[in-house]
Image (cartoon, rainbow, N blue to C red):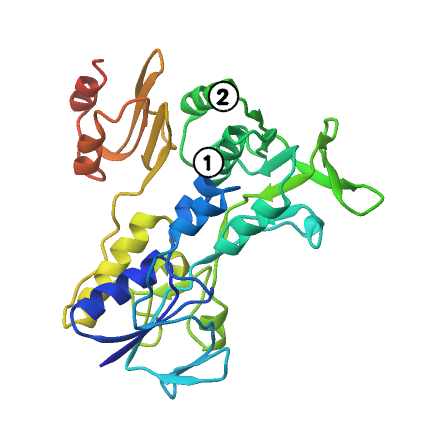
Amino acid sequence: MHIVIIGNGVAGATVAQKLAHKGVEVTLFAEEPYGFYSRIMLPHSLYDKEALAHLISKSDPPYLVKQPVTGIFPDRKEVETGDGKLYSYDKLVIATGSRSRTLEIFSNTEGVCTLRTFYDALLIGDIITSPVVVLGGGLLGLETALNLNNKGFDVTVCEAADRILVRQLDTVAATMLRSKLEEEGLTIRESTKTIGKRLDADAKLVALEVEGSPEIPCNTLILSLGVFPEVSLAREAGLRIKRGIVVDDYLRTSDEDIYAIGDCAEHNGQIPAIVPVALAMADTVIANLTGGDRVYEEPVLFTRFKDEALDVISVGDVTAIPLSKRVGERYEAYFLKEGTLAGAILYGSSEHLKFVRMNYQKPVSEGEIAALLDF
C-alpha cells in the first residue's frame, strides 16, 4: 500500500515518519523548499539567521519530495505536482495546514509581513526596522512582539478586542499579562481598530491610522490576525468543504480513501488549529491506515505563553464565570459547566497542570476546586 501525504507540517510529517517506521511505503510532499521545521519556534528565532537555520531538520527522509501538490484526482487516485509529475496513491492524507489572515488595505504595501512560514521569518529579518507594530494580540503576535522587543526593537502590539489573548484568558489574567509585558518594554494598545495607513513619498509605510486615536508610527507591520484553513486543493478535488475539509470520526473526508488532519480539517464543526490537535489527529490516522478502526478523540485543548520569567497556561473553554483566586503574581481560574471542568487558566504557576490535564472535560466538584485554590 502506498500512502501519499500532502503537507510537511507537524501533522503530515508525523504521519509520514511513523508510517515509514512501520514499513509502509509513503511519499510526503512539502510545499516549501526546506526540510521539516517547527512553526511555533519561528517567533523565537526572528532576526537571527543562525537560529532560524537551526530550526530546519539537518537531513531529509528519503520519502520527502520538495514539490507543491497542484492537483488531486480522486477518480484516478493520483496527485500532480508543480513540476507536472503524477503520483498514484492507495490512500491520501491531506495536511495542508492554514494560511495567515491579512487585510486588504495592506496588500502590496512595503514593510508589511505575516509570520507563518520560514520564508516569512527570513523576510522579516531582512526588512525590519523600528518602530514595529504587531497587529493582533493573540499567542503568536505576543510571542513575536516580545522576542523582537528583547532584540532591541521598538514594538507596539495593537489588539482590536478589549484584551490580549482574548480566546485564552479572562480579564484578570489578561490584565496581569499586559502589565508584565509592558514592564518588559512592550507597548500594548487594546480596543484599537486599524482603519488605514500612511505612506511616505517613496510609498513606504510610516504610520497606521486607527479609529478614534492619533496615528501610530510604524515602519514594519507584522500581521498576526489568525489563520484560515488551506482547502483549495480539496475543494478543487470535489471534497466536502465547510470552513475546513469536513471529516468524520475516523478523519475520513467525503472520499473514503482520503483523510484530512491538522489545521485544514473540520471535525464536528471545530477547527482548533493547535499542535495537540494535529498530533492527536496524526495518531488516529496512523492507526486507521495500519489496520485499525480508531475514532478520533479530541485531546486537551492546551496553549501556553512562556518566557524566561513567566508561565501562562490556558486549557479549554474559559468563557464561563470561574472559581478563581489571585495572590500576588499567581492567579488560577477554573471554569465549570454542569459540574464538568470545561477549562482553566494557570498564571504564574503550573503546580496544578497535572490535575487539569487529568480532569479536563470530566466531573469535578467545587470542593476539589476550592482545595486547589488554597494557596
Q: Quadrant of the C terminus?
A: top left
Residue at the top extreme? 328
Residue 227 seen: yes
Q: In which quarter of the image is residue 241?
A: bottom left
Q: In this view, does 266 lie to the left or right of 355?
A: right
Residue 273 seen: no
Q: Is mark 1 on a helix, strand or loop?
A: helix
Name the N-terminal-most of marks 1 and 2: 1
- Label drawn at residue 184: 2
Q: Distance between the residues labelled 1 and 2?
A: 13 Å
Q: What element carries label 2?
A: loop
- Circle 1: residue type: Glu
At 27% across and 67% down in the image, what residue appears? 16
- Which residue is more in the foreground, 132 or 95? 132
Residue at the right extreme? 201
Q: In which quarter of the image is the N terminus?
A: bottom left
The percent position of residue 152, horizontal first and vertical second, equals 56, 29
The percent position of residue 239, horizontal first and vertical second, equals 42, 74
Q: In this view, does 135 lie to the left or right of 42?
A: right
Q: Name the residue under label 1.
A: 143
